[in-house]
């Protein structure tokens, strides 16, 4: 069973996402007109701290087969081959049920797939990205697939990785947990002038967002007090120098960061209309549709988010998701947030099969104009789950208008424990293990990026791809 894995219950509702690709099996001799057999592809992974790179690999895998079977490793299998995953087994298994390109799921598959694994999944071939993992024995985990001619390669999504995200979370942990256990109520708030300047000039771990806030503050002060342009420029230059800190301290921090963690991928994840169009459903509300609207940060997208979106969709027939921009998230949750950029968060939400449309950079408040523009009949919000306290003072309620109109609904969370606090806490508990994992993975990523050439880099899989017959 270890070599085959356990087949998960059928996904519901049944669907075929995207346009079918070319069929793989050639018809038997003299059987003209006989339908060709659908091509079945197998794609496996840990799927820990899911990000747009995972989703894009799954999307590409779906583009080169008709039925995509996704295998997922157990916690024990992952721990044996690299490090304990941050997201627990049930959280990883359940999230895959909500991804739009997946047709079937197999649990507890081996880290190094065997021919028997393909047979158990009834798959014709195995699919993986062009960054091949190494197993506990120090050999490529996909050697058997390669040797059997059963391996198909899709392009790695550059600029995002689990290593990168764990690095960001380790940085967050270092900033927020330095003086003891994490307390969400003490997360950095929107700072006044003194606090912003102090953070930008004096804190060795000053965040980029704090510096942005300080820069914005300079502009507002200049306008308020009529500062000369020359003085403003000098102040901005002084801030830039101060943010870097003394040369010795800067070098020490750089050395420490390079040794312990990667907090940014070597290349940038580029936002493009093509990528968004590949992820989006491109649907529009039809006459008679009951439009449901939800909004939020959707940072570090996890099964709790996905379950919430599923239940929200069940309140109507068309689900529109508003995603707040980075500045709104920072102002409400603290300067260290969001962990993922707006582009990353949009792609993650678009990968969820319950989502029909996404509003990018949605307003913080659900306004009357927004409700009328989208003909919204229901506005939903999750409840009874851990969340950061609202950092905006006063009686502000972004759902005030929907409540007054009687269209506001709450959805009880099925995963109340899942939040930033939980994920960061897990990383703190196993900090040394994750630091070692990140050092090893970062070296491998560097090798991948440094050896990349246009000539040896595979093209991404598209719907127009033509497949050879088996």
Image: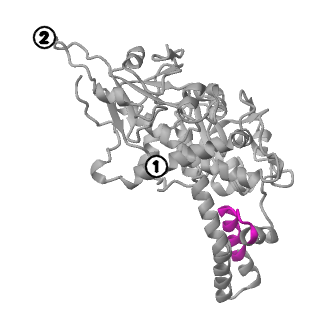
Drawn side of residue 43 relative to residue 352, left or right: left
Q: 20 or 183: nearer the eye?
A: 183
- Dot 2: what SS? loop
Residue 450 placement (x, y as % from top left): 39, 55
Occupied quadrant, residue 404: top right
Residue 215 placement (x, y as % from top left): 67, 72
Look at the image and say whether residue 206 sits in the magenta stretch: yes
Q: Residues within 10 Å of mark 1 (few under 14, many from 20)?
A: some
Is residue 154 at least partly visible in the picture?
yes
Find disc 2 in the rendering and name its residue.
Answer: 30
Look at the image and say whether residue 54 sits in the magenta stretch: no
Find disc 1 in the rendering and name its residue.
Answer: 445
> Residue visible at 70% across and 46% down?
366
Q: 281 or 340: nearer the eye?
A: 340
Residue 234 placement (x, y as % from top left): 66, 85
Quadrant where the C terminus lies? top left
> Residue visible at 41% across and 34% down?
139
Extent of the magenta region:
202-219
Is residue 298 at least partly visible in the picture?
no
- Mark 1 against mark 2, which lies toward the viewer? 1
Q: Residues within 10 Å of mark 2 (few under 14, many from 20)?
A: few
Q: 333 or 224: nearer the eye?
A: 333
Majority secondary structure of magenta residues: helix
Drawn side of residue 232 relative to residue 79, left or right: right
> Residue visible at 45% across and 16% down?
4
Q: 348 or 125: nearer the eye?
A: 125
């Amino acid at each position: 069973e270890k070599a085959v894995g356990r087949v998960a219950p059928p996904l519901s509702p049944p669907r075929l996402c995207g346009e079918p690709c070319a069929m793989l099996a050639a018809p038997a001799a003299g059987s003209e007109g006989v339908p060709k057999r659908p091509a079945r592809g197998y794609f496996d992974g840990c799927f820990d701290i899911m990000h747009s790179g995972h989703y894009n690999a799954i999307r590409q895998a779906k583009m080169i087969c008709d039925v995509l079977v996704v295998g997922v490793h157990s916690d024990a299998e992952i721990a044996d081959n690299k490090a304990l995953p941050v997201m627990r087994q049930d959280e990883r298994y359940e999230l895959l049920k909500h991804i739009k390109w997946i047709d079937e799921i197999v649990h507890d598959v081996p880290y190094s797939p065997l021919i028997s694994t393909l047979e158990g999944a009834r798959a014709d071939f195995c699919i993986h990205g062009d960054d091949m993992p190494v197993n506990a024995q120090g050999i490529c985990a996909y050697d058997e697939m390669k040797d059997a001619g059963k391996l198909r390669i899709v392009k790695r999504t550059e600029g995002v990785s689990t290593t990168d995200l764990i690095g960001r979370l380790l940085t967050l942990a270092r900033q927020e947990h330095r003086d003891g256990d994490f307390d969400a109520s003490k997360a950095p708030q929107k700072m006044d002038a003194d606090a912003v300047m102090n953070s930008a000039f004096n804190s060795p771990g000053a965040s980029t967002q704090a510096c942005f806030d300080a820069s914005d503050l300079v502009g507002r002060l200049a306008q308020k007090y009529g500062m000369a342009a020359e003085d403003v420029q000098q102040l901005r230059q002084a801030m830039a120098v101060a943010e870097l800190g003394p040369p010795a301290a800067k070098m020490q921090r750089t050395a420490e960061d390079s040794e312990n963690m990667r907090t940014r991928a070597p290349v940038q994840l580029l936002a493009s209309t093509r990528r968004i169009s590949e992820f989006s459903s491109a649907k529009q509300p039809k006459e008679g549709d009951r439009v449901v609207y939800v909004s939020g940060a959707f940072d570090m997208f996890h099964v709790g988010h996905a379950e919430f979106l599923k239940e929200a969709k069940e309140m109507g027939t068309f689900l529109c998701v508003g995603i707040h921009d980075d500045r709104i998230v920072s102002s409400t949750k603290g300067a260290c947030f969001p962990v993922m950029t707006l582009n990353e968060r949009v792609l993650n939400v678009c990968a969820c099969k319950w989502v029909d449309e996404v509003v990018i950079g949605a307003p913080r408040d659900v306004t009357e104009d927004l409700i009328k523009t989208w003909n919204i009949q229901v506005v939903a919000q999750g409840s009874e789950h851990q969340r950061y306290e609202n950092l905006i003072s006063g009686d502000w309620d972004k759902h005030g208008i929907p409540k007054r109109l009687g269209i506001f609904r709450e959805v009880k969370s099925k995963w109340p424990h899942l939040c930033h606090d939980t994920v960061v806490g897990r990383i703190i508990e196993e900090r040394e293990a994750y630091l070692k994992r990140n050092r090893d993975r970062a070296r491998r990523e560097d090798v991948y990026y440094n050896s990349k050439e246009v000539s040896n880099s595979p093209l991404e899989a598209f719907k127009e791809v033509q497949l050879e017959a088996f």
